[in-house]
Image (cartoon, rainbow, N blue to C red):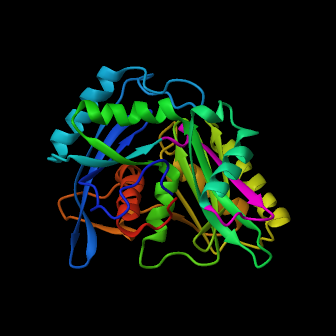
Amino acid sequence: MSVFASWFAAPPPDAAVEIATDRVAVAVVGERSGGLVVQSYAAEPLPPGAVVASLTSSNIHNRAAVAVALRTAMDRAGARPRRVAVVIPDLAAKVSLVKFETVPARREDLDQLVRWQVKKAAPFPIEEALVTYTPTARAGDGSGEFLVLSARRDVVAEYEGMCAELGLYAGLVDLATLSVVNLFLGSADAPAGDWLVVHLRPEYTSIVIMRGAHVIFFRNRAEGDEAAIADLVHQSTMYYQDRLSGERFSRVFLGGGGRVPGAVETARRSLEERLGASVEPIDPRRAAAVTDRIAVTPDLMDILGPLVGMAVRTRKEAVTA
């Protein structure tokens, strides 16, 4: 799922960058022997309050700190990119699933219909928003469902502007959790059936339910402890079974980083108990090899998950808008 821009037929970007609320991370992903490989990466912490993800207000509060962190991460990764793909927090954009009984044949008419639909629930004037969408399902009766992303244009420009300060062209912007989804869709053994992704970040938790390659459910909640995470997954699962004709998940994936050490492991145990299923880690090595000199740790998987997913997206257009 590309949020607001794409190079379409252009070559892949030179690097992937994530600007999160707690860090800036960079990864250079290349190709080797027909597959992807993480050639280098680096992450730099941000001071509290430097980035505050929000739908309705400014996100970058300390441009100097973000610029220093991004420049340092680039130097540590040995990266000298000109074109980058940027991962931003889920809370910076609104994700909606909308269904139309009749889908217009003309793209211009569909654009207007989508904007009119999301305008009803948008917490900002739709005239000031960037909106993109991708189909998730089409039925024989002419109806269709779409995954729609919307965000304030000036908020997206803040993230792009941070890259521009360092001479980087941000040609693609995507959300962290949708980048993680692309990590799985771009892997050799992409999950089949209905599968669940739970992505933890210090300031939010996002849940995605997939049906094959299509998003059928997306929800995020700001902050929350491990008990709240389990409750959120339980509520989402009940909705999936009651409203989405779901039975059970073929696979369940969990990863990211919580507010406290051990949050992911605590959530894993709780989810396995609630769901009665094995919970697998969000592991970037599903889609890209890691060189021997890079030690694989839970923190590394947290950092590389969205970045590798973004790299997969730019090469394979796994989930696009």
Side of 21 relative to 38 (left or right): right
In this view, 170 is above or below 110: above
Residue at screen point 41% across, 56% down: 305
Counting from the top left corner in percent of width and height, residue 116 is at: 72, 45
Residue at screen point 52% across, 50% down: 264
In this rendered view, identify the residue nearer to me: 265 or 218: 218
Give the mark count. 0
Please report the bounds of the magenta region as a residue range: 89-106
Instruction: Answer yes or no: is residue 22 visible.
Output: no
Residue at screen point 37% across, 53% down: 307
In this view, 246 is above or below 200: below
Side of 275 relative to 302 (left or right): right
Judge whether residue 197 is colored magenta: no
Residue at screen point 28% across, 43% down: 169
Residue at the extreme right of the image, as rendered: 242
Counting from the top left corner in percent of width and height, residue 48 is at: 43, 23
Side of 10 relative to 139 (left or right): left
Judge whether residue 92 is colored magenta: yes
Counting from the top left corner in percent of width and height, residue 146 is at: 66, 60
Counting from the top left corner in percent of width and height, residue 21 is at: 45, 33
